[in-house]
């Protein structure tokens, strides 16, 4: 082996080593987002159901993680016909993605995306869904449903990928997918007891620990800087792109928080901090699709729109008697939809507002509408079947007493004399 060959091999090894460290760190940060989901959702529900939220997030990781390993990853990243693939475990073959990290590490970072998508659903069904029924849905979602959307968007042969659909880190494939599944699940489950009065008007059911929810929101905010920059799947040669993605991610989230603060102050006469937390998250969701192709000023505009849109959506969803205790449908579903469309409007090269024509916007609209419709319809059918067979909702006495004490024999807070 000559000197030139040795130099090439050493350079290849160095690139793989650097990229492996980068992707492993980002994957670990994404995994930590599950702690954010747990705290955010626990804080937004009543104390008598806080531990049931923790249980559901643990189920997301454990049941969902194993399901994604056994068949989900193969459906998403196997040899695709454009719509689906089939493989089991983690293949050693070439995935066609020009990876500089191992397939196993790529699986691990993709695992974080899969369990983030299903964790969106856990908040919308909080305080009333049976834990074993939820576990069954988690398996179906992470083994089949989410992987199909990932196949369309990120598999090199996926029909949306081939068409030029831009969903860099998952506004559609993760957030709209999870958000519209949450919408269907909340509709089939029905509202919590006491959520609407005899005239059908919403009755506020405040969360029991807003500082806890805020900490969860900050953890998710932090996690997004693994979620979006980590989607580069490598550091070498991507230093400019990583900077763009990180900057846009922050600016959109900050703008989302600003617009929610201003909007709620002028609408209600005071700042709604709970809505502001969701406003920051809405900005993050909205920028996730286009953080690689928007310029910073456009990221701010997207965030400002998302932070206002989330409050409007939460109020509307509540008015039509769909009970979503944490605002997951508005944050992830509505803003996942908006963020995907925003790429077609604000992309600095191909966006409609930058002289790129309507082609990208049409592709973005087609993709997110198919993903959202698929997620809603399939979830609705699955939930209806489960409702008629194994039942999905706790009984009325258990709901009144609290799921924690009845189903888990433990409460989130205890008092020692």
Image: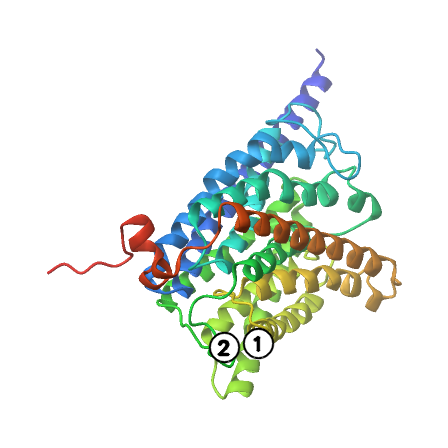
Q: Nearer the viewer, residue 132 or 302?
A: 132
Badge 2: residue crowd in 10 Å (few <14, some 14–19, many ≥20): some
**Residue 275 visible in the current orientation:** yes
At horizontal 67% and vertical 34% (from top left) the residue drawn is 75
Q: Pinpoint residue 128: horizontal percent, then vertical percent.
A: 44, 58
Residue 346: give its label.
none
Where, quadrant-wise, is the N terminus in this rendering? top right
**Residue 167 visible in the current orientation:** no
The residue most toward the left is 417
Does dot 1 land on a helix, a strand or a loop? Answer: helix
The tag earlier along the polypeptide, 2 or 1, is 2
Q: Which residue is mark 2?
A: 202
Direction from residue 9 to residue 352 in the image, left or right:
right
Colour logic: rainbow
Badge 1: residue crowd in 10 Å (few <14, some 14–19, many ≥20): some
Cα separation, mark 2 vs mark 1, equals: 7 Å
Does dot 2 land on a helix, a strand or a loop? Answer: loop
Where, quadrant-wise, is the C terminus in this rendering? bottom left
Direction from residue 291 to residue 53 in the image, left or right:
left
Position of residue 226 relative to residue 23, above or below, is below
Q: Nearer the viewer, residue 408 or 219?
A: 408
The residue most toward the front is 388
Residue 212 appears in which quarter of the rendering?
Answer: bottom left
Q: Mark 2 and mark 1 in contact? Answer it, CB < 8 Å.
A: yes
Position of residue 74 relative to residue 272, above or below, is above
Q: Pinpoint residue 28: horizontal percent, then vertical percent.
A: 49, 42
Q: Pinpoint residue 283: horizontal percent, then vertical percent.
A: 60, 65
The residue most toward the top is 1
Residue 319: give its label.
1
Position of residue 384 relative to residue 277, above or below, is above
């Amino acid at each position: 082996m000559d000197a030139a060959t040795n130099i090439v091999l050493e350079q290849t090894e160095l690139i793989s080593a650097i990229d492996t460290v980068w992707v492993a760190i980002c994957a670990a940060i994404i995994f930590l987002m599950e702690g954010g989901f747990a705290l955010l959702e626990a804080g937004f529900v009543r104390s008598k159901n806080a531990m049931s939220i923790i249980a559901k997030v643990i189920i997301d990781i454990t049941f969902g993680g194993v399901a994604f390993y056994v068949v989900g990853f193969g459906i998403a990243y196997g040899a695709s016909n454009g719509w689906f693939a089939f493989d089991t475990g983690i293949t050693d073959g070439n995935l066609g993605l020009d990876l500089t990290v191992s397939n196993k590490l790529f699986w691990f970072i993709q695992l974080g995306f899969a369990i983030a998508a299903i964790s969106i659903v856990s908040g919308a069904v909080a305080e009333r869904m049976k834990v074993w029924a939820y576990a069954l849905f988690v398996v179906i979602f992470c083994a089949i449903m989410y992987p199909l959307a990932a196949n369309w968007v990120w598999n090199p042969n996926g029909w949306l990928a081939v068409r030029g659909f831009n969903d860099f880190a998952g506004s559609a494939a993760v957030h709209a997918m999870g958000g519209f599944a949450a919408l269907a699940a909340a509709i089939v489950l029905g509202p919590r007891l006491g959520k609407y009065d005899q005239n059908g008007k919403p009755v506020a059911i405040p969360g029991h620990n807003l500082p806890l929810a805020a900490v969860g929101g900050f953890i998710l905010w932090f996690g997004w800087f693994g979620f979006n920059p980590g989607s580069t799947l490598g550091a070498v040669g991507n230093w400019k792109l990583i900077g763009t993605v990180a900057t846009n991610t922050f600016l959109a989230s900050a703008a989302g928080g600003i617009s929610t603060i201003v909007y709620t102050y002028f609408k209600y006469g005071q700042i709604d901090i709970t809505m502001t937390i969701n406003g920051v998250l809405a900005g993050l969701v909205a920028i996730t699709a286009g953080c690689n192709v928007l310029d910073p000023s456009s990221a701010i505009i997207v965030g400002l729109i998302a932070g206002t849109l989330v409050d409007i959506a939460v109020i509307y969803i509540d008015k039509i008697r769909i009970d979503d205790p944490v605002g997951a449908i508005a944050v992830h579903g509505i803003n996942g939809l908006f963020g995907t469309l925003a790429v077609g409007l604000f992309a600095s090269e191909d966006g409609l507002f930058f002289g790129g024509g309507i082609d990208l916007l049409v592709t973005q609209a087609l993709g997110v509408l198919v993903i959202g419709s698929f997620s809603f319809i399939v979830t609705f059918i699955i939930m209806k079947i489960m409702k008629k067979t194994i039942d999905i909702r706790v009984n009325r006495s258990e709901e009144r007493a609290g799921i924690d004490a009845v189903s888990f024999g433990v409460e989130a807070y205890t008092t020692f004399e």
